[in-house]
Image: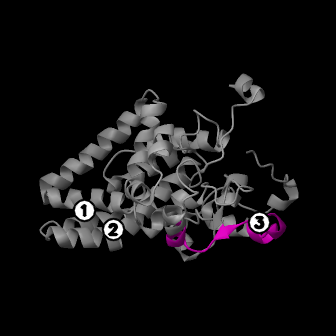
C-alpha cells in the first residue's frame, strides 16, 4: 500500500535551521569520551557487573551514538560533508565495530526509496517474514534485530567498499586493539555488549519497530513523542524527519509546532517498550508488516 501525504508549502519550513549547532558536536564528543572511560574503568570487573552496566548504562550511550551517526549521515553537524564523515567515524569508536560509513550508504537509500523492494534494506527479508511468526520467534528476532539490521544489506544488496570504509575499519580496529592492549578484553567486550544489548530487547531499540512497522494499515510511518527523544537526537519525530531530513533532530519538534494539522491526526507512540510488547504479542504483526512498493519507472530512469 502506498500512502500519499499532503504536500507542504515552503513557507511552513521558513525559519527552521538546516544544520546542527555546536552543542551537538560537543555532546557527541562527551558521550564518546564517557563511554570509553567507562570501558577502561571496568577492565577488571566481573562479567556479571560488565553485563549489568552494559545493559543499564552503556547501552543508552552507544545507542545515543548510533543515532548520532544517523544524524551525521544526513550531514547535520557541519555544512561540509567530509567533516560529518570524520565525526561519524569518531562517534563510531565506542560502538566497537565499524559501521558509520556503510550505514550512510544504505540509510540515504532508505529515505530516497522508502519501501522499494530490493533497495530499501530497512525492510526485512522474505526469510525473516516466513520464519518469524510466533511469540518465541519474534522475541528471538527482537533480541537479535541489530544483527539482522546490520547484516541484511550485506547479504541482500552488498556494495563494494570504498576508501572511507577502509578508513573507518582501520581507525576502529586501532581503537579496539589499543583497548585490548592497554586494558584487556573485558573493556572491549563491554563496548560491544553495550551496542548489541542496546539494540535488542531494550527500550531504546523500540524505535527500530515503531518507525515503519505497520500497526494501522492506513499509515506507513509513525512518530514517537516520549522522553527517550532526549537521549536519541529526537529520532522519535520520524514522520517529521522523513518530511524534512535536512532539519536536525533537535529542531524537529518545531516542525510539529508549525504544522500540527499534518501530524496530530496521525497515530503515534509514547512508549517504545510498549511498541516492542505489541509487536511480539500481536499475532497479526511481524517482519512482514511493512509497506512495500515497486520502483517507479520515472525513478528508475533517473538512476
Residue 130, above or below 198: above
Q: Residues within 10 Å of mark 2 (few under 14, many from 20)?
A: many
* Residue depicted at 84% across the width and 61% down the height: 12
Q: Say whether marks 2 and 3 touch (CB < 8 Å).
A: no
Residue 207 in percent (x, y) is at 53, 61
Mark 1–mark 3 distance (CA, rounded to whole Å)? 39 Å
What span is in magenta? 256-275
Secondary structure state at the residue bearing disc 2:
helix
Q: Is residue 244 visible?
A: no
Residue 83, above or below 17: above
Indicate the quadrant where residue 216 lies: bottom right
* Residue depicted at 87% across the width and 55% down the height: 9
Q: For residue 263: magenta? A: yes
On the image, numbered disc 2 is attached to which residue?
58
Which quarter of the rendering shows the N terminus? top right
* Residue depicted at 74% across the width and 62% down the height: 16
The label number, if any, that marks residue 235 in the structure image:
none
Count of all numbered marks drawn on residues in the image? 3
> Who comes first in sequence, dot 1 or dot 3?
1
Q: For residue 98: magenta? A: no
Q: Nearer the viewer, mark 2 or mark 3?
A: 3
Nearer to the camera, 222 or 130:
130
> Who comes first in sequence, dot 1 or dot 2?
2
Residue 53, above or below 7: below
The label number, if any, that marks residue 190 in the structure image:
1
Indicate the quadrant where residue 209 lies: bottom right
On the image, numbered disc 3 is attached to which residue?
263
Amino acid at each position: 500500500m502506498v500512502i500519499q501525504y499532503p504536500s507542504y508549502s515552503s513557507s511552513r519550513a521558513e525559519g527552521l535551521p538546516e544544520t546542527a549547532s555546536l552543542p551537538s558536536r560537543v555532546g557527541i564528543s562527551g558521550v564518546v569520551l564517557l563511554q570509553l572511560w567507562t570501558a577502561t574503568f571496568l577492565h577488571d570487573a566481573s562479567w556479571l557487573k560488565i553485563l549489568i552496566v552494559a545493559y543499564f548504562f552503556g547501552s543508552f550511550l552507544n545507542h545515543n551514538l548510533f543515532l548520532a551517526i544517523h544524524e551525521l549521515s544526513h550531514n547535520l553537524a557541519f555544512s561540509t560533508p567530509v567533516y560529518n564523515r570524520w565525526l561519524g567515524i569518531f562517534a563510531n569508536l565506542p560502538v566497537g565495530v565499524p559501521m558509520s560509513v556503510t550505514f550512510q550508504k544504505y540509510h540515504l537509500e532508505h529515505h530516497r526509496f522508502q519501501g522499494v523492494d530490493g533497495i530499501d534494506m530497512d525492510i526485512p527479508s522474505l526469510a525473516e517474514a516466513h520464519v518469524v511468526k510466533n511469540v518465541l520467534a519474534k522475541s528471538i528476532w527482537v533480541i537479535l534485530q541489530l544483527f539482522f539490521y546490520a547484516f541484511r544489506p550485506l547479504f541482500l544488496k552488498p556494495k563494494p567498499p570504498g576508501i572511507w570504509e577502509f578508513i573507518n575499519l582501520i581507525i576502529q580496529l586501532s581503537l579496539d586493539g589499543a583497548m585490548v592492549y592497554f586494558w584487556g578484553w573485558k573493556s572491549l567486550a563491554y563496548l560491544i555488549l553495550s551496542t548489541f544489548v542496546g539494540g535488542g530487547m531494550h527500550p531504546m531499540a523500540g524505535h527500530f519497530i515503531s518507525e515503519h512497522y505497520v500497526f494501522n494499515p492506513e499509515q506507513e510511518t509513525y512518530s514517537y513523542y516520549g522522553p527517550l527523544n532526549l537521549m536519541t537526537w529526537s529520532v522519535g519525530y520520524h514522520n517529521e524527519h522523513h518530511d524534512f531530513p535536512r532539519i536536525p533532530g533537535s529542531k524537529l519538534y518545531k516542525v510539529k509546532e508549525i504544522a500540527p494539522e499534518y501530524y496530530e491526526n496521525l497515530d503515534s507512540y509514547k512508549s517504545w517498550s510498549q511498541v516492542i510488547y505489541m509487536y511480539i504479542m500481536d499475532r497479526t504483526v511481524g517482519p512482514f508488516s511493512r509497506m512495500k512498493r515497486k520502483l517507479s519507472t520515472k525513478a528508475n530512469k533517473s538512476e
